[in-house]
Image: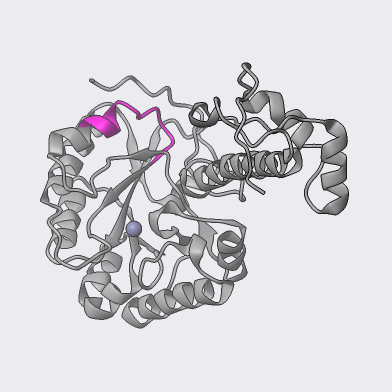
Amino acid sequence: MREELTPAEPRTRTLCDVIPKARAFTSGPRDLARARSLNVPGQALFPVRSHLSIGNRHPAIYNSLMLALAVTAASATAAVAAGYQSMSPTRQWYGRTFIGNPRLARQLALTYDDGPNDPHTQRLLDLLAKHNVHATFFLIGRYVRQLPHVVREISQAGHVIGNHSFTHPLLIFKSEKEIRRELNECRAAIEDAIGAHSHLFRPPFGGRRPAVLRVARELGLQPIMWNITGYDWNAPAAAGIEKKISRRIRGGDVILLHDGGHKQLGVDRSQTVIATDRLLSQCQNKGFEFVTIPEMMQKPDTSFQAPPLAR
Ligand SMILES: [Zn+2]
């Protein structure tokens, strides 16, 4: 029998009209019966179908679709929130990470990711020595295997070295076994280079979920994030890097910069080196003290009021 298309009712229903009732059931024969009892008309939701419908004979299908839509929307919202918590450096939803210590208003901690990277890491070492400053370097294990002499230079200059995984994957998509292997292989590479390993770990891209933090802690590693970034991974001009950092400094901050790049060795970090030089001069003139992450994690010093930096 030919199915007749009939004009829809003049009113146009919205998603909000439908979802409260759609929430009352899920799917299946019992739910379809309940849906019919709710008597939600099956008129089309969208304008393109607002003038034609297949009568009111399929409300349950219609409502099931609306429910699926609502569930999808809720899931998408939850996924966005979960993703934000996974990647935002200062969020603590998935477990505690170190992001600085505001009580240590005199102190700032410079951290450099994705090295070692010849020759920019060494240029940075020269610069830090000039300012008599120690920093914390989170190294990629496969680069450590290629440039162990640079790792030794970092260590011998008194800087702290942390684990940044072996291949720099986004760990939120990795199994616990893979996470453990990434951290262990990086640890082994660093230990082979300098005979020691700190208790510090920085997740690649800042990405973490409970399993990432759990595995790190099982291996005796403390997750270290940051609260200020120079956004220097695309090698912008030094002035831009410096400005992004200096306007956010309050004291007790962990600053993220890069002496290497996770995609390959040899990326140009000369702008980061220049920006570091300017920041060190500016901040030291204001009375700030640069410390390593382990130093900042020690007891608080509340004796210092951080002055505002030039904008
Ligand atoms: Zn990285």
Q: Which span of residues is magenta-colored? A: 243-254
What is the tally of numbered marks visible in this picture? 0
Q: Vertical placement of 101 versus 309: above or below?
A: below
**Horizontal side of residue 259 vs 109, given as left or right:** left
Q: Determine if residue 35 is in view.
A: yes
Q: Residue at x 33, y 46 (%)?
A: 256
The residue drawn where x is 27% and y is 26% is 286
Q: Position of residue 311 (x, y in %)?
A: 23, 20
Vertical position of residue 110 compared to residue 181: above or below: above
Q: Residue 146 at what x, y percent from top left?
A: 23, 79
Image coords of residue 291 (percent x, y): 37, 46
Question: Closest to the observer: 9 or 73?
Answer: 9
Whole-percent x, y for residue 153 in the image: 22, 69
Q: In this rendering, would 123 be left or right of 244?
A: left
Q: Nearer the viewer, residue 232 or 81?
A: 81
**Residue 253 on the magenta segment:** yes
Q: For ligand 1, which image quadrant applies?
A: bottom left
Residue at the top extreme of this rendering: 10
Is 71 placed left or right of 282 in the picture? right
**Which is nearer the eye, 205 or 297?**
205
- Taking the spot 34% from the left edge, 38% from the top edge, the residue there is 289
- Residue 195 seen in the figure: no
Indicate whether 309 appears above or below 33.
above
Q: Is residue 38 above or below residue 147?
A: above
In the picture as drawn, the residue positioned furthest to the bottom comes out as: 192
Query: Is residue 247 part of the magenta span, yes or no?
Result: yes
The colour scheme used to paint the residues is: one colour
Q: Nearer the viewer, residue 285 or 198?
A: 198
